[in-house]
């Protein structure tokens, strides 16, 4: 068994579940029905499992009977002042290998898949889905129900109001480009310098098919 480090000022609910080798920093709060996998770093002042923010229901004033789960995978980093809230419908989940930088806010029912990067000050609104390996730039924000496709990149300070397809590089007021950096980083079986050039290649067709299955179909795509 690998020992964990829990700072004495951290507050951890008795029903929270922590894996092996978990670091919990000063003044962090880990709430009810929150689970952490192995090798998770929780920095100071992180809050996991506070009630969902919903201005109509006002759950703060009208507590719900059921506490739905917040699931944090293994090998996850959550830097200082990150907040992750409870779901309204199903689950709020951060999968294995995700890196979340300081002051990011991850709202109710958000799902972040493996190895995504959430940069400093990012705000993910409710029901956002960030697929595998995507990279969200500093200070970017998503509208509710947004899907950011696998290995896509969102520019710093971008407001994302449509879905970003896999391997898209979204910069506001510019045409959607190919995130060629991700192809090299992840050694993806793709060849080309534009989205048009990779669109018919088998690996990209698989990514795009999954993106279409999982996103909210009424939303537009960049």
Image (tube, rainbow, N blue to C red):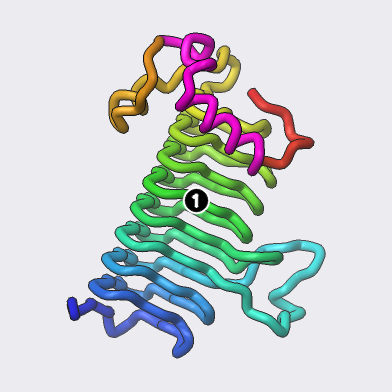
Can the viewer see residue 71? Answer: yes
Can the viewer see residue 177? Answer: no
Q: Residue at x 74, y 78 (%)?
A: 61
| Residue ID for mark 1 | 112
Image x and y of residue 59, in percent? 72, 73
Q: Is residue 39 above or below residue 158?
A: below
Q: Residue at x 52, y 31 (%)?
A: 206
Q: Nearer the viewer, residue 141 or 164?
A: 164
Toward which corner of the image does residue 50 lie, by quadrant? bottom right
Instruction: Farthest residue to the right: give it.
Output: 56
Q: Is residue 12 above or below residue 40?
A: below
Q: Which residues are magenta?
A: 193-214
Image quarter where the C terminus lies is top right
**Badge 1: residue crowd in 10 Å (few <14, some 14–19, many ≥20):** many
Left or right: 190, with 38 as reference point? right
Instruction: Farthest residue to the bottom: give it.
Output: 14
Image x and y of residue 73, in percent? 40, 62
Image x and y of residue 3, in percent? 19, 79
Residue 205 within the segment the image draws in magenta: yes
Dominant SS of magenta comes to helix
Left or right: 148, with 115 as reference point? right
Instruction: Farthest residue to the front: give it.
Output: 202
Image x and y of residue 1, in percent? 19, 80
Q: Is residue 111 above or below residue 92?
A: above
Q: Secondary structure at mark 1?
A: strand
């Amino acid at each position: 068994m690998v020992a964990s480090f829990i700072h004495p000022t951290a507050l951890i609910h008795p029903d929270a579940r922590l894996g092996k080798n978990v670091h919990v920093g000063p003044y962090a709060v880990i709430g009810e029905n929150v689970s952490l996998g192995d090798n998770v770093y929780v920095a100071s002042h992180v809050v996991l499992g506070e009630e969902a923010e919903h201005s109509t229901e006002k759950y703060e004033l009208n507590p719900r009977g059921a506490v739905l789960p917040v699931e944090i995978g293994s090998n996850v980093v959550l830097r200082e002042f990150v907040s992750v809230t409870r779901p309204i419908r199903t689950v709020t989940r951060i999968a294995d290998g995700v890196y979340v930088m300081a002051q990011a806010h991850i709202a109710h029912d958000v799902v972040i898949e493996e190895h995504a990067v959430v940069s400093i000050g990012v705000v993910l609104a409710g029901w956002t889905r960030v697929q595998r390996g995507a990279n969200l730039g500093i200070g970017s924000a998503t509208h509710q129900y947004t899907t950011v496709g696998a290995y896509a990149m969102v520019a710093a300070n971008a407001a994302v109001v449509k879905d970003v397809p896999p391997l898209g590089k979204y910069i506001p007021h510019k045409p959607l480009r190919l995130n060629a950096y991700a192809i090299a980083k992840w050694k993806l079986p793709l060849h080309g310098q534009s989205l048009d050039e990779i669109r018919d290649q088998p690996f990209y067709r698989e990514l795009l098919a999954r993106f279409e299955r999982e996103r909210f179909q009424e939303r537009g795509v960049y």
